[in-house]
Amino acid sequence: MKLTETITENYEDISQTGIDSLQVKKELSRIDSIIPLYEHWLEKTIFASVLIAINYTSAIKGLAKIKTQYTKEDITLFSLKLIDYESYPKFKESGIFLSALVNTHYLQEKIKNKTQAKTHDEKEELQKPYEIVTQHLNTQIDNLCYKTDGAVVCIKGSVGETVAYYMKSGTVIVEGSYGKHSGYSMRGGTLILKKKAESEIGFLMRGGTIVIKDNSDLVSQNIIAGNILIYKEKKEYFCSIKKTAWGEKPIINCRTEHAKQN
């Protein structure tokens, strides 16, 4: 199935994805340079959570071979294309490849920003969010936003396990549902989870802030350090996580920041 067909079948209103439909054909040539690398990576990737770093490095090395600079819009279009690969046995690992796409592009743009004179609009462009669309997928992908370091990423849809794994800085917003171990081993940045979560939020978290909805009972017992902001009963609670012994429930000290107005 061609990408334009995928878009047409899954989105009657293309504007919901943040993509200008008139630009789709222009972007396809750059997508065509990414897809073969993804297909090769999907075939060769190792299906084991303990080897995420190896799979990520493999994706980074593959993307270094692309001669044409891709854009944030290309990454959004590529996320739409993922529906064509759901039958692949290792499809759930695709979050690692998407993470490599975002992190590589952000680093390249950050370096250009420092070494070349930029207009105000170009500097603002760097801060605009990367939009990754998953709401059209039947299979939730794992490890999305792995090692995010400075980028702002908005996930329009649901994700699988360990979103924002080893995140260092930046902001990740998940608009749909999500699996366990969200914010696994976070070092910094902000993870915003808009819907109710599964268990073990912030497992092995070492820094940063996770914003969750309503239920502190879902916070992992194995948090080392960090902050959690809980939205509950139309009030905002700021909760500081204190280090505890391994396996003990973390001490969450909450104070009301302000009550939301009806």
Image (spheres, grey):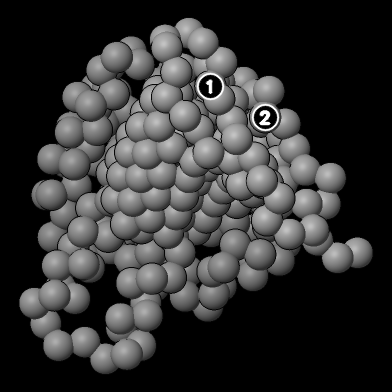
Mark 1 or mark 2: name the one nearer the start of the chain.
Answer: 2
**Residue drawn at (18%, 32%) of the image:** 58
Q: Secondary structure at mark 1?
A: loop
Q: Nearer the viewer, mark 1 or mark 2?
A: 1
Residue 8 x/y as whole percent: 64, 58
Q: Nearer the viewer, residue 32 or 171?
A: 171
Does residue 5 lie above or below 59 as drawn?
Answer: below
**Relative to residue 259, is residue 14 drawn left or right?**
left
**Residue drawn at (44%, 54%) of the image:** 171
Q: Total label count? A: 2
Residue 202 x/y as whole percent: 49, 29
Q: Nearer the viewer, residue 202 or 39?
A: 202
Q: Nearer the viewer, residue 236 or 64?
A: 236
Does residue 95 lie above or below 3 as drawn?
Answer: above
**Relative to residue 12, is residue 141 drawn left or right?**
left
Marks 1/2: CA–CA distance: 10 Å
Residue 51 x/y as whole percent: 25, 17
Residue assigned mark 2 = 216
Q: Quadrant of residue 129?
A: bottom left
**Residue drawn at (32%, 90%) of the image:** 120
> Does residue 36 show up?
no
> Does residue 17 show up?
yes
